[in-house]
Amino acid sequence: MKKESGIFSADQLKLDVSKEADRIGVFMREGVFKQLKRKGVVVGLSGGIDSSAVAALSVHALGADRVVGIFMPESDSSDDSLRLGQLLANKLGIRTFKEDISGILQGAECYRRRDEAIKAVVPQYHAGYKSKLVLSSLDSSEFRISYVVVQDPEGKQTKVRLTADAFLALVAATNFKQRTRKMMEYYYADRFLYAVGGTPNRLEYDQGFFVKNGDGSADIKPIAHLYKSQVYQIARFLEVPEEILNRPPTTDTYSLAQSQEEFYFSLPYDKMDLCLYAKDRQIPAETVAVAAGLTAAQVDRVYRDIDAKRAVARYLHMEPLLIEAVGDVGTPS
Amino acid sequence: MSSIETELRKYILDKLLFGRTEVALSGDASFLESGIIDSTGVLELVSFLEEQFQVKVEDEDLIPANLDSINAIVRYVEKKRK
């Protein structure tokens, strides 16, 4: 990373990509072979930038013959996810498996539970509707309020505020998706004696934008220290296809297209990166505002929102609580 | 203490502080700044206010000036009930 200069700008986030890719390579070889004692890495491929970067880094570190990619589409995921995932896998030359998880999700009644949660606030909602969860914008209130947006079969959209109960029920139901995907990744990890590669970037890891025991679970997380804009830099260096680099970040969890901005971060990732980086270095809001193209008041709100999300993320990161340490469990060998 | 405040304090102690009576909450203490309420907590609080005090909390009412402290909520509920 570049040395701090007098002027704060996005340049602070510029990586020496070749050096960083090599550093991650050393970490992955050491981590997978020596610490985890596994033969390779399994990565769930969503066609998004993070999983693409992790797969490309895994190939860079271990070689294509030690990386397995899994496509896990379901009824609500976009066709692009599968197509772009395949595009990447072909480019990397890795082995892949496709598992449509819709059947498992139906078995767990994920969709029915989700629909019931939405019906509690939108009584006319039925299976012909599409839906997504959105957060109120940063400018509308310091309270971040969750809404469901539904689209009727004619295409008309309505936004309705969720009750706490409906919100929790909706999130609990859709979390089946991330947890089912992780279960499938561990199937292949067990099958080949591989490790599961996790794909959270620094924004997601720090701010708790993951499902506990879902996408938050993995054996190794090679990009958890990288800001999202740095993930793009690494991905570009490792020649991830242009179409993936240009795809707007999506959650791919709801039937209506949903950006990560409207669901969680409220800011485009490059601005969010800058705010998070600056906050951790106690850089004043006024200075960040200029670099991020925001007002100082907006940066202040983002700073407070970062703290609020960290408070919620604490539970997500917590290991199970034990009354006392048990033997030498967890002690590195 | 008004009956609104009594009910509200009972709710906060039970649902937001999980019975931690050692946390002294002054009437003007900001929920956001003290970190005792998160985004789910706000939705829970709104449901409580609507059910307990029979008021309709509109989207535009969901601002700190109305809901960020015990005193603010008491004033807000009193105003809505008029």
Image (cartoon, coloured by chain):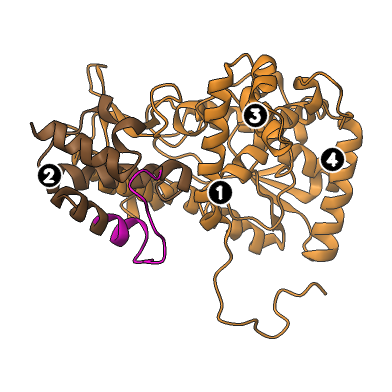
Q: Mark 4 = which residue?
A: A60
The type of residue carrying mark 3 is Cys
Tell me the tag on residue A275. Answer: 3
Q: Which chain hosts label 3?
A: A
Figure check: B4 above or below A295: below
- Chain in brown on the image: B
Whole-angstrom CA distance, mark 2 to mark 1, is: 40 Å
Mark 2 vs mark 1: same chain? no
Q: Chain of mark 1?
A: A
Q: Could you say where residue A44 lies in the image, as x and y percent from the top left?
A: 61, 45
Identify the magenta region: B11-29
Mark 3 vs mark 2, CA separation in Å: 40 Å
Which comes before the other along the chain, label 3 or label 4? 4
- Rendered orange, the chain in question is A
Q: Is residue A92 magenta?
A: no
Name the residue carrying label 1. Answer: A215
Q: Quadrant of residue A332?
A: bottom right
Total count of labels: 4
SS state under label 2: helix
* In this view, the mark in front (4 or 2): 2
Residue A236 appears in the picture as rendered: yes
Residue A290 image point, x, y percent:
67, 14
Label 4, secondary structure: give it: helix
Q: Secondary structure at mark 3?
A: helix
Q: Which residue is mark 2?
A: B53
The subunit carrying tag 4 is A
